[in-house]
Every structure is written in structure tokens, then in C-alpha cells.
Image (tube, rainbow, N blue to C red):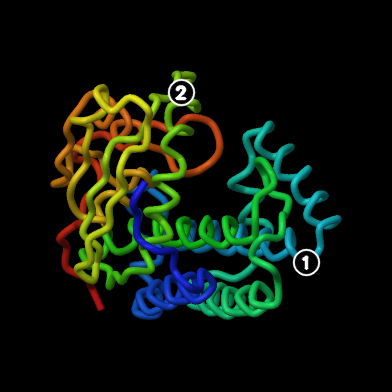
């Protein structure tokens, strides 16, 4: 399998992701903070509370494991009771601009802790244990994916960079998971993937299988940004310019899910897009 090199510092990439989002949050007025986005009608307040809560959980998982296991039990109980959204909000006191400041400051503090640890270290999480590097990439993915709703809602295009490679890898590595979570047998090999990075580089993955005849026409080509939008379920594949050839490739991107948890249904075609609306300043 041919593919681009890993990024040198996932911590720095997460930090950059947070800085890009913080710059947007710093520009919000009161009306913006209370406006609904196209993601489940969440407001910017809801989104930043969610990001802050899970950043704090990630910090606890790698520095206070016993306390994290107690938090995990509370999370599981609130999920079972259908009260998790309220549980999240109860754990985060700040709102609006103060919320943005606390989230960003503590995101940078989380980076400082990560930089002292071995990226191969295994840590507890809501699903299976994962390496610290995977945890960092997951936090970047969450920040990027939820941030998409905020940029979309304000009619803005996010400044991207090749830090996105981490999320592309996550999309590639969850190819089998995207079938398993739907109780389907994963195909023998992933389709060939040919992407153009935000900085204009060519990223590609070649299928590796003992039988190439069944996958020779299975390909996905296009923008790395749009690929990440699909695997994070911030866009329906029909709302992108990705070129998809083959049944496996089409099925994969119709249900791709690069995050853990129960099977999620991607947004319907035409339901998630960059809005064009005037802002009242």
C-alpha cells in the first residue's frame, strides 16, 4: 500500500486545528452564539461545550485514569438514561466568549501534557483502549468535524492545511469498521484512494490484496477535504465532487464512519452545506 508519510507532530496539528477554530469563535457576536447550525440544530455553544467536555475527558484519561473510569461510568449511565446532553452541559460552567477562552486555553494545556508522554502509550477510552497518538488524532477529528458546522453556518471557508492528513488516515483506517458497524462483512481490500491535499500534494493509497481482479476498478478520487467531510459525516457523498468507481467504493462512502459508537446515518443529500447569510454585527 503506497501512502504519504505520517505527520511529524500530531500534537502541533491538534493545536493548529484548535487555533483555527478559536479564531472563528473569537469573531462571534451574541446572535451567532445562539444560532442553530445544520448539525442537529446545535448552536455554537452546544458544539464548544461538547468539544471542551471531551478534551477534559481526554486529559483525565491520560493523567488521572482512576478518575476517568469514574467519569466513564457516569457517561454510560447518562447515555442509558438519555440525559447525556444535559450531563455534558452540567460539567461545563462557562458560556459564550468565556467558554471559547476556557476551551482554547485548556486545549493548549492538554497539548502540553501530551508532549510529555509517549505517543505509543495505551490509554482508556469510551470504546477500546487506544494509543495516545490515536487519541490525539481523534480529538483533532472531532474539532475539525464539529468546526465544519460553525464555518458552514457563518458562510465561511475554513483555512485548511496538510494537518488534514491525520484525519485522512483515520478515514482509511476505519474502512473495515464502516462495514462492521453496520453488521456487514468488510470487503477484502479498500478501494484505491487518490486525493489532492489542501496544499496541493498528491496522497494515494493502493489496494493490497492477493486478488486484484475484484478491486481493479474500485477507486475514489478527489479533494482530501471532501473525503474527510464524508468520513466524518459532515457531508453526504452526493454533495461532493469526489469521483467514485465501483460498488465497494460507493457502499463505503455512502456509510463511512471514522468514529466509534453505534452506526450513524450520514446527513441526507443537500442537508449540510455552507450557508450564505448576512451576519448582524
Give the residue number, with chain letter if any, for mark 2. Answer: 182
Task: Give the Cα distance between marks 2 and 1.
Answer: 34 Å
Residue denoted by label 1: 63
**Label 2–label 1 contact, CB within 8 A:** no
Direction from residue 83 to residue 207 in the image, left or right: left
In which quadrant is the C terminus drawn? Answer: bottom left
Q: Residue at x 32, y 31 (%)?
A: 252
Residue farthest toward the top in the current orientation of the protein:
184
Neighbourhood count class around disc 2 (C-alpha, 10 Å): few under 14, some 14–19, many 20 upward: some
Helix, strand or loop at disc 1? helix
Q: How many marks?
A: 2
Residue ID at (17%, 45%): 242
Q: Which residue is drawn at 63% across and 43% down?
A: 84
* Front residue of this view, candidates 145 and 228: 228
Residue at position x 18%, y 36% in the image: 244
* Foreground pick, 64 / 167: 167
Q: Is residue 150 above or below residue 244?
A: below
The answer to which quarter of the image holds residue 75 is top right
Q: Looking at the picture, how far across and down is residue 266, in whole percent?
A: 34, 35
Residue 24 on image: x %, y %: 35, 75
How dense is the environment of label 1, judged by Cα within 10 Å: few (below 14), some, or many (20 and up)? Answer: some
Quarter of the figure with residue 60: bottom right
Q: Where is residue 101 in the image (x, y as percent from the top left)?
A: 53, 79
Left or right of residue 27, residue 196 in this image: left
Q: Which of 90 and 146 is in front in this view?
A: 146
Mark 2: which secondary structure? loop
| Numbered tag placed on residue 258 in the rendering | none
Residue 16 at x, y = what percent?
43, 76
Report the residue that reaches farthest toward the front: 210
Amino acid at each position: 500500500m503506497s501512502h504519504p508519510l505520517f505527520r511529524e507532530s500530531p500534537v502541533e496539528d491538534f493545536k493548529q486545528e484548535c487555533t483555527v477554530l478559536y479564531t472563528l469563535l473569537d469573531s462571534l457576536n451574541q446572535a451567532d452564539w445562539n444560532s442553530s447550525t445544520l448539525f442537529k440544530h446545535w448552536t455554537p455553544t452546544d458544539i464548544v461545550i461538547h468539544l471542551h467536555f471531551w478534551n477534559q475527558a481526554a486529559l483525565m484519561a491520560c493523567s488521572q485514569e482512576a478518575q476517568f473510569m469514574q467519569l466513564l461510568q457516569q457517561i454510560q449511565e447518562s447515555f442509558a438514561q438519555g440525559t447525556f446532553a444535559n450531563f455534558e452541559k452540567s460539567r461545563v460552567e462557562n458560556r459564550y466568549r468565556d467558554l471559547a477562552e476556557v476551551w482554547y486555553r485548556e486545549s493548549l494545556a492538554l497539548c502540553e501534557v501530551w508532549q510529555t508522554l509517549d505517543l505509543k502509550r495505551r490509554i482508556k477510552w469510551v470504546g477500546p483502549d487506544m494509543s495516545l497518538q490515536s487519541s490525539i488524532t481523534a480529538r483533532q477529528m472531532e474539532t475539525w468535524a464539529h468546526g465544519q458546522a460553525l464555518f458552514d453556518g457563518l458562510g465561511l471557508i475554513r483555512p485548511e492545511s496538510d494537518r488534514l492528513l491525520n484525519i485522512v488516515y483515520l478515514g482509511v483506517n476505519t474502512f473495515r469498521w464502516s462495514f462492521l458497524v453496520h453488521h456487514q462483512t468488510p470487503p477484502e481490500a479498500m478501494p484505491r484512494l487518490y486525493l489532492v491535499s489542501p496544499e496541493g500534494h498528491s496522497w494515494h493509497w493502493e489496494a493490497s490484496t492477493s486478488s486484484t481482479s475484484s478491486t481493479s476498478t474500485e477507486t475514489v478520487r478527489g479533494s482530501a477535504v471532501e473525503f474527510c467531510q464524508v468520513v466524518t459525516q459532515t457531508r453526504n457523498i452526493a454533495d461532493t465532487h469526489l469521483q467514485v468507481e465501483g460498488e465497494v467504493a460507493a457502499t463505503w462512502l455512502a456509510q463511512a464512519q471514522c468514529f466509534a459508537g453505534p452506526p450513524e446515518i450520514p446527513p441526507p443529500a443537500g442537508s449540510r452545506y455552507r450557508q450564505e447569510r448576512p451576519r448582524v454585527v
